[in-house]
Image: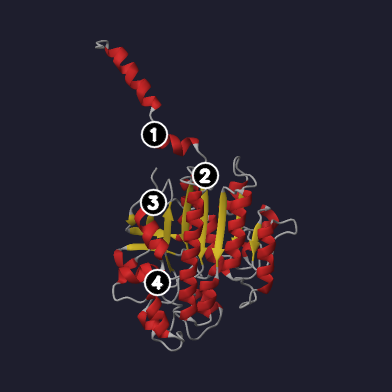
């Protein structure tokens, strides 16, 4: 039958169009989730270039250089970085975005004055640097994180959680004020926990304590995975810590192995999320770091600005530790572009707004004092 009435043709067309699935309908109608992950003190040089041969061959830092070479070294940079970070380069680089490869005109930098952990985590989570934060001491953070703000928004209430290997995170997120559940450091879960949590508590008790304030990352990872399975948070922050502590110990071998293990944990997380109906295709993953490290063999174990070194009254680092303000970021998810490496220049203070915008929220309304989002990473 031929339809000659233009109005009727248009009406039929519109009816058919409304019946078809549309990409934007999913983003608006289905709640999005966020997984923010930080890898403490992991350099952009290893992320984008793989293991550093100078550090492998430096006897101060590598006890078994031949094993490191066998496991991670290759003459081709693209192969080296895949060997070290297979998930990052097989999945995120092809389906998401990365920034921070300074050799390719992609820059991400710390904005705070100090270039160490507490100021960096505050900047990531609050969207601005605070010159009053001058140490890594256990001081309650006067600034409000985007995690705390989200927890007060309808739909996110009591569905925001944090897990960290370092015991200062309850202070950074200020559990005293925010009321957010933060499992960090040598803390174990509550007695009414699941069987899996009880097993993790026992593993935590038996695991070696290499540092007085940082637990092993597999414990942090286990608690976070159990929370995802049993409590279904919409926003979860996981802060792995081994890499920085092994670097401070002067062990490049263990720093590299820890970075590789963390990549495997990220793959484990992402595969689980994509296999779960609640999280599959509805979850954004953002990965970054609190600070960089020295860009020379002498400076590699350390990180600090000239101001921080002066505060410590150090005579050996009047210029600070060059390179420790240089960081990186990777992201993947339904609201993240699939562009691989993106050239440009950004600040650590833009991460909070980017996280909010990835959830299709308006950062300018929710956190008006925070820096603006990294719009070029986002689909909208």
Question: Along the polypeptide, which appears first: circle 4 or circle 3?
Answer: 4
For disc 4, the marked residue is 46
Which dot, 4 or 3, sits closer to the camera?
Answer: 4
Q: Are marks 4 and 2 in contact (CB under 8 Å)?
A: no
* Residue at mark 1 to residue at mark 2: CA–CA distance: 19 Å
Relative to 78, say whether 94 is above or below: above
Which dot, 4 or 1, sits closer to the camera?
Answer: 1
* Residue at mark 4 to residue at mark 2: CA–CA distance: 34 Å
Residue 377 is marked as 3
Q: Residue at x 60, y 68 (%)?
A: 166
For disc 2, the marked residue is 277
Mark 1 burial class by Cα count in 10 Å: few <14, some 14-19, many 20+? few
Residue 2 image position (x, y, % from top left): 24, 12
Mark 3 burial class by Cα count in 10 Å: few <14, some 14-19, many 20+? many
For disc 1, the marked residue is 22
What secondary structure is found at the residue carrying circle 4? helix
């Amino acid at each position: 039958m031929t339809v000659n009435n233009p109005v009727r043709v248009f009406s039929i067309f519109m009816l058919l169009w409304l019946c078809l699935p549309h990409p934007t309908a999913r983003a608006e109608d289905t709640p999005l989730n966020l997984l923010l992950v930080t890898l403490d003190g992991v350099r952009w040089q290893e992320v984008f270039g793989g293991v550093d041969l100078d550090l492998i061959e430096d006897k101060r830092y590598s006890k078994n250089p031949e094993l490191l070479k066998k496991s991670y070294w290759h003459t081709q940079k693209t192969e080296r970085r895949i060997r070290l970070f297979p998930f990052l380069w097989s999945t995120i680089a092809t389906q998401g975005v990365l920034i921070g490869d300074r050799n390719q005109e992609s820059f991400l930098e710390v904005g705070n004055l100090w270039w160490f952990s507490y100021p960096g985590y505050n900047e990531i989570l609050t969207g601005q640097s605070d010159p009053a934060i001058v140490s890594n001491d256990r001081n309650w953070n006067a600034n409000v994180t985007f995690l705390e703000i989200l927890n007060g928004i309808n739909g996110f209430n009591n569905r925001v959680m944090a897990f960290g290997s370092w015991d200062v995170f309850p202070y950074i997120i200020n559990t005293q004020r925010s009321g957010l559940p933060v499992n960090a450091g040598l803390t174990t879960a509550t007695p009414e926990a699941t069987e899996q949590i009880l097993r993790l508590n026992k593993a935590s008790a038996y695991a070696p304590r290499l540092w007085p304030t940082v637990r092993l990352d597999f414990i942090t990872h286990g608690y976070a995975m159990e929370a995802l399975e049993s409590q279904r948070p919409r926003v979860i922050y996981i802060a792995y810590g081994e890499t920085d502590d092994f670097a401070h110990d002067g062990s490049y071998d263990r720093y590299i192995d820890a970075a590789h293990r963390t990549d495997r944990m990220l793959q484990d997380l992402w595969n689980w999320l994509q296999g779960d109906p609640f999280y599959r295709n509805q979850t954004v993953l953002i990965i970054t770091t609190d600070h960089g490290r020295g860009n020379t063999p002498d400076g590699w174990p350390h990180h600090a600005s000239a101001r921080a070194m002066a505060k410590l009254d150090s005579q050996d680092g009047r210029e600070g530790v060059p390179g420790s303000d240089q960081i990186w970021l990777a992201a993947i998810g339904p609201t993240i572009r699939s562009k691989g490496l993106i050239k440009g220049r950004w600040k650590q203070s833009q991460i909070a707004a980017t996280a909010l915008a990835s959830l299709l929220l308006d950062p300018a309304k929710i956190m008006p004092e925070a820096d603006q989002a990294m719009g070029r990473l986002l689909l909208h």
